[in-house]
Amino acid sequence: MPLSTFNFERVIPDQPWRRIGIPVAIVTAVCAIGWEVFVRSLGYSTTLNDTPDLWAQTRESVKPDSIVIVGDSRPLFDMDLDVLQKAFGKRPIQLALAGSCAYPVLADLANDESFHGTVVCGVVPGMFFAPAGPLLETSEMALKRYRNWTPAQRMSHQLGMWLEERVAFLKADELNLGALLARLPIPNRAKAQLPPLLPPYFATVERDRRVRLWAECAQPGPLQTRVREGWLPLFTPPPPPSYIPQEAFFAEMGKKIEARFKDTVAAVDKIRARGGRVVFVRFPMTGKLKEHEDRTQPRSGAWTRLLAETNAPGIYFEDYPELANFQCPEWSHLSAADSIEFTRRLVPHLRDALSN
């Protein structure tokens, strides 16, 4: 039957839409205001979400001679862009991503033939050499958005930023229904093991992705405790899957890690061949998290091998008393004030590393 014989007319019911619409609008506004007041009472404030769109916008600002910061959440929290701009005469581009593996972003810069700038790469060995999983997916998702960013997504991002800077409850990964349901206290069962919870939203994010730890998280209290308690489960790898022999599983993981070393050397060589520079940095961690990382990711392991094989300079915070005496309030990141002072003290060591 030809389509022309169908009647697609949609009949709108004859209803008092104005009298219906006004109460609906009022109820919606009251609910939104109530939710906003409630989440602010929990300590949330107006700040941007660190979305793949915001990352893509920042990646687009990279110039051939830019200073670019890559890595996980530690360089994101611990490096102050204002201090670095004053020290080096240009504002660095912040491309570090919380909960990510830095390698895909480093490789992206290496494959960008126009780029011959400086890369400051934060390294947590267990994250940088992650062979697969969510850490890699976080970086790859951001890169995918940058490479395939549509005009509609750009416009939505601009509108979203305007709203996020004014409304506290717009926390995409924290206050939506799915995230709230995921935090229900459901116990593990024999065939239903729940993954560790991600930390709550505990930072402010600016348009150039300058990130600062919330004051509430820098002080003893429920938020700081909740963040602290989340790190050790997140930094503990899950057991091997039961359906693969352990020997085969660890052999495959070993091959992927070896490939990561080889690929990292190639990426650093590409940047260096164009006149660029790469410096690796190990940022502070304290408390039980430091004990855990020192035990599971010792300096003599992946960090030492990374510097030897790439022939790139490295700055390990414990080598310098002026960098080693900072305390991370929740064991993994510096407070906003300490990030400024830490960056000031880091600058001379960056100069030395990049001048060699």
Image (tube, rainbow, N blue to C red):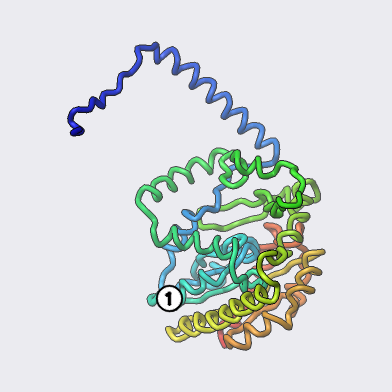
Q: Is residue 137 above or below residue 321?
A: above
- Provide residue 125's location: percent of width, then percent of height: 66, 74
Looking at the rendering, in which quadrant would you find the C terminus? bottom right
Name which residue lies at 57% across and 69% down.
Answer: 102
Q: Nearer the viewer, residue 254 or 99?
A: 254
Q: Is residue 201 visible?
A: yes
- Provide residue 7's location: percent of width, then percent of height: 23, 25
Looking at the rendering, in which quadrant would you find the N terminus? top left
Q: Is residue 269 above or below residue 167?
A: below
Q: Is residue 348 visible?
A: no
Q: Which residue is mark 1?
A: 111
Name which residue lies at 19% across and 28% down.
Answer: 5
Would you say 87 lies left or right of 226 here? left
SS under mark 1: loop
Residue count near mark 1 (Cα–Cα under 10 Å), binned few <14, some 14–19, many ≥20 = few
Q: Is residue 209 above or below residue 166?
A: below
Would you say 320 lies left or right of 83 here? right
Q: Nearer the viewer, residue 95 or 297?
A: 297
Would you say 138 lies left or right of 194 here? left
- Provide residue 104's location: percent of width, then percent of height: 51, 70
Q: Give the amino acid at mark 1.
A: Asn
Q: How many marks?
A: 1
Name which residue lies at 54% across and 62% down.
Answer: 137
Q: Quadrant of residue 74?
A: bottom right
- Provide residue 181's location: percent of width, then percent of height: 65, 40
Name which residue lies at 58% across and 85% down.
Answer: 312
